[in-house]
Amino acid sequence: MSPDPAGEEPEVPESERTAALAERVAAATARTGRTVAVAESLTAGRIAAALGAAPDSGTWLRGGVVAYAAEVKHTVLGVPDVPVVTATAAGTMATGVRGLLGADVAVAVTGVGGPDPQDGEPAGSVWFGVTAGDTAATCHHVFDGDPVEVLEQTVTRALELLRDAVATGDAEPADRVSE
């Protein structure tokens, strides 16, 4: 894209950014042979949908679990009896979906889209869990914006984490924040 008249780079639409990131995940799986799974709460399947639209997803995307209700997080993904917007929940969701679907790498998201707080967490608070190889990690972000913007930013960040974990075989994000 060419710069606008003011000399600034134009904003890339979120759908294009998401598609480009999903294509990078696909390219990383082609290079490494790793398979992918996702567990989603806040994003309600948006990450899996982006990945499913990427090239050759039938060969590397094992699937996903949308665990919107706390009960589903607990019974299907093995999240212990803790608040569901925490590092513990995100990490357990990633480990649980990876085992359930037999994937090499998994990412999970749980958070508060807003506009109201939940479980003592402010709107925009999102925990990510990633597992790859023998490693597992969590990181936390507080995104600005309305609920739609929080969802878009969450999907983007999850795809970035997934891309990096597939490429390196390591779950440890560079910007890890512990609870």
Image (tube, helix red, strand yellow):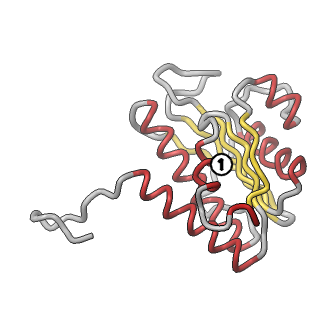
How many numbered discs sit on the rendered protein? 1
Where is residue 152 shown, x and y percent of the image? 47, 44
Between 64 and 87, which is closer to the camera in this rendering? 64
Position of 158 relative to 144 (above/below): below
Position of 163 relative to 90 (above/below): below
Q: Residue at x 84, y 52 (%)?
A: 98
In the picture of the structure, the residue carrying the numbered disc 1 is 48
Quadrant of the image occupied by residue 146? top left
Quadrant of the image occupied by residue 130? bottom right
Quadrant (top left/top right/bottom left/bottom right) for the N terminus: bottom left
Question: Which residue is at the far left?
Answer: 5
Amino acid type at circle 1 is Ala
Q: Residue at x 64, y 54 (%)?
A: 52
Q: Residues within 10 Å of mark 1 (few under 14, many from 20)?
A: many
Q: Is residue 157 left or right of residue 91?
A: left
Quadrant (top left/top right/bottom left/bottom right) for the C terminus: top right
Q: Is residue 123 left or right of residue 2?
A: right
Where is residue 101 shown, x and y percent of the image? 86, 51
Q: Secondary structure at mark 1?
A: helix
Where is residue 153 shown, x and y percent of the image? 48, 46
Where is residue 5 shown, x and y percent of the image? 10, 65
Q: Is residue 76 left or right of residue 31?
A: right
Q: Residue at x 24, y 65 (%)?
A: 9
Position of 157 relative to 4 (above/below): above
Between 90 and 122, which is closer to the camera in this rendering? 90
Q: Is residue 50 left or right of residue 36?
A: left
Between 137 and 149, which is closer to the camera in this rendering? 149
